[in-house]
Image (spheres, rainbow, N blue to C red):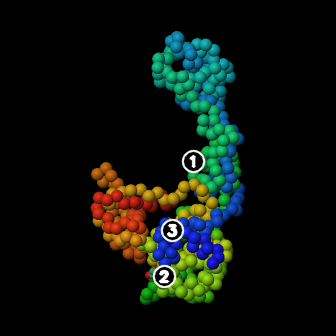
Amino acid sequence: MSGIAAIVSCLDGYDPDALRVDTAREAVRACLSPLTDTEVVKVRDALGRVLAQEIVPGIDVPSHDNSAMDGYAVRFSDLQENHPLREIGTALAGKPFAGKLGAGECVRVMTGAVMPAGADTVVIQEVVKRTADRISVPPGQKKAQNVRYAGEDLKIGVPVLAPGKFLRPAEIGLIASLGIGEVRVKRRLRVAFFSTGDELASIGSKLKEGEVYDSNRYTLHGMLARLGVEIIDLGVVRDDPAALEAAFRKASQYDAVVTTGGVSVGEADFVKQLMAKLGEVLFWKIAMRPGRPMAFGKIRNSYLFGLPGNPVAVMVTFYQFVRDALLHLSGRTDDYALPLLKAVSSENLRKVPGRTEFQRGVLFHEGGEWKVRTTGQQGSGVLRSMSEANCFIVLEHERGKVEAGELVPVQIFESLV
Ligand code: AMP
Ligand code: MG
């Protein structure tokens, strides 16, 4: 035994013919090596990319102590006297006050203005009484109030972002706040995909008897696009050994390949022979619904995910296995697991122990709590169930039927961007 077969066979409870969802996930993860290639991009273009360097501030942010409010900069010790203070100047954001506060003096400050030398506290303008150049401050002020200190956001020399961090608008702004214009990121993962099946018709042709339009390639395109990977569409491939071999050879020059169809029992045999010739691919029967058959392996340096053909099974297996795998391969080290929240089931749900089910659900708010119902018909060919749903209801492996009112885990689709 070599390569990935050797790796997965060491896992607890590994049985390719009755694989638990969590074991399948673990098996995929154990075989992946994240990409290491990097490139330098302008900070704006780094949105949605994976950071490949540490970000260490070369300056403090903010770089000076400054006022958090519009008001008056004062010496806190002067406030004990309860005498009016004399206003000796103004500090604006970007226009500091050049002098120094002496006893009994104050400086008018605006938000973001550098704290004038000698001042330690800011009193907001709304509470101050002003007559000519004198102000009086009511009691109850606190020392150092309304002052933002140099480095309280980012400190010079203290690392703030680690390699593997996914860059969102907040990180882009944070990097810009340090005056950094370019960053090193991982190169984008290149993912090829194709559909297989003699029954598939392409959009634009008229359906012949027994044909269906190839919708999987469109769903897959959408799901891959949302992951931010580079996408290579290799089209429809007929159930023909020579055509499939050519497609897999072409696809194997990319980092990963996702296919749909051709892994169900009736079809798997010739695909299996072909795969054995091209690389090392495992055929799994996963204890889940929908989406029982799935192939996973390597063809040359490319990872293969052979998903079932049924349109709902494609989406479920993609989100439960492929998404995490591709994000891991992309080099991400932050926590991107889909959150599992609990909601009250508003109906009885049929379920047998011994497999994990991903029912399509509608999460809704009623009577002060979050409840969930199914979208109705749950066939793995009913893609409408995915369109009507806003979450998966995840019924765990050991769980039996669910009574209305019980809590069930849900995965919200909105987090799948
Ligand atoms: P398979 O896994 O190839 O046996 O396909 C299972 C079911 O999914 C069959 O009813 C297929 O017609 C359907 N199917 C397979 N591929 C696609 C596709 N690309 N688009 C839409 N339906 C498909
Ligand atoms: Mg097929």
Where residue 277 sits, quadrant-wise, is bottom right
- The mark closer to the camera, 2 or 3, is 3
Judged by depth in the image, the label closer to the viewer, 3 or 1, is: 3
Please tell me how crowded label 1 is: few (under 14), some (14-19), or many (20+) other residues with Cα within 10 Å: few
Q: Quick one: 107 or 175, which is closer to the camera?
A: 175
To which residue does mark 3 refer?
23
User: For the residues marked 2 and 1, what is the alpha-carbon distance in whole angstroms?
Assistant: 44 Å
- The label shown at residue 264 is 2
- Residue at 57% x, 48% y is 170
- Tell me the amino acid under the disc marked 2: Ser
Residue 260 seen in render: no
| Relative horizontal placement of residue 54, taking residue 291 as reference (left or right) | right
Q: Is residue 263 left or right of residue 341?
A: right
Image coords of residue 208 (percent x, y): 45, 88
Closer to the camera, 254 or 137? 254
Q: Position of residue 374 (x, y in %)?
A: 34, 66
Q: Is residue 173 above or below residue 290?
A: above
**In which quadrant will I find the N terminus?**
bottom right
Q: Position of residue 345 (x, y in %)?
A: 32, 60
Helix, strand or loop under label 2: loop
In 3D space, how far apart are the residues under numbered discs 2 and 3 (Cα atoms)?
Answer: 20 Å
In the displayed structure, would residue 119 be above or below residue 380? Answer: above
Name the N-terminal-most of marks 2 and 3. Answer: 3
327, 273: nearer the viewer: 273
Distance Cα–Cα, label 3 vs label 1: 35 Å
Q: Decide which of tag 3 and tag 1 comes sooner along the chain.
A: 3
| Dot 3 and dot 1 residues touching (CB under 8 Å) | no
Q: Amino acid at mark 3?
A: Thr
Residue on which the image places disc 1: 170
